[in-house]
Image (cartoon, helix red, strand yellow):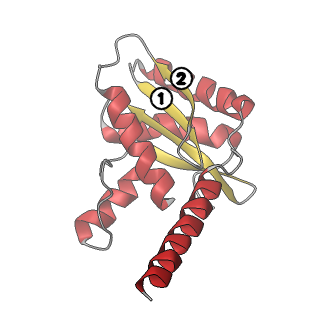
Amino acid sequence: MKSKFYSYVISVLLVLSTATALAQNEESLMTYDLATVAMDAAEAYAREQGWNVTILITDQNNNPVMLRRIDGAGGRTFNFATAKALVVNETGLTSGEYGRRVEAGDMEEIEGGVTFAGGVPVYRAGQRIGAISTSGVRAAQDEEVSIAGAEVIGSISN
């Protein structure tokens, strides 16, 4: 009897892990061409402001599509941009909104995430296609850069 039970449990775990793997291998909705247009706009905005930042664009599965680190951006900016993209892709919220909800106790904290602004979701035709996150200046300024990139190819809300 135990052997049948263990076989059943193992079968269920295999099915779940296969389903998870398939979901993670979902086709990227953030194309290279879209990322290039968004990145160029975000970088142009940052340069106009004189901000040395790192900008990361991911697809909806949190896979990196494009990264730029402007000369003078701090060494840790990549880590912060990555952590902001993680919470955006896990929640569908801006990283700042996620932080407000965590602080209010309305949401559990995501391991490896950060709770400050700078990451935004990117929606196109009503579907979330990825995230743009920026790090290197004040959180609100990081978010401005990310929004500049997102709005040229879509919007930051559904």
Proximity of marks 2 and 1: CB atoms separated by less than 8 Å: yes
Q: Dot 2: few (<14), some (14–19), or many (≥20) neighbours within 10 Å?
A: many
Q: Which mark is residue 147?
A: none
Relative depth, front residue between 13 and 110: 13
The residue drawn where x is 36% and y is 46% is: 117
- Residue 152 vs residue 103: left or right? right
Asked which quadrant contains residue 71, the reply is: top left
Where in the figure is residue 27, as x and y percent of width and height?
71, 47
Q: Residues within 10 Å of mark 1 (few under 14, many from 20)?
A: many
Q: Is residue 56 above or below residue 6?
A: above
- Residue ID for mark 2: 43
Q: How many marks?
A: 2
Reading the chain from its start, which is encountered first: label 2 or label 1? 2
| Secondary structure at numbered mark 2 | helix
| Quadrant housing the N terminus | bottom left
Where residue 5 sits: x, y (%)?
A: 46, 83
Q: CA distance from mark 2 to mark 1?
A: 8 Å
Judged by depth in the image, the label closer to the viewer, 2 or 1, is 1
The residue that mark 1 highlights is 55
Residue type at mark 2: give it. Glu
Residue at 49 percent across and 70 percent down: it is 10
Judged from the image, the secondary structure of the residue bearing numbered disc 1 is strand
Residue drawn at x 54%, y 74% as measured from the top left: 12
Q: Position of residue 124 (x, y in %)?
A: 71, 51
Q: Nearer the viewer, residue 81 or 120?
A: 81
Left or right? Give the position of 18 relative to 141: right
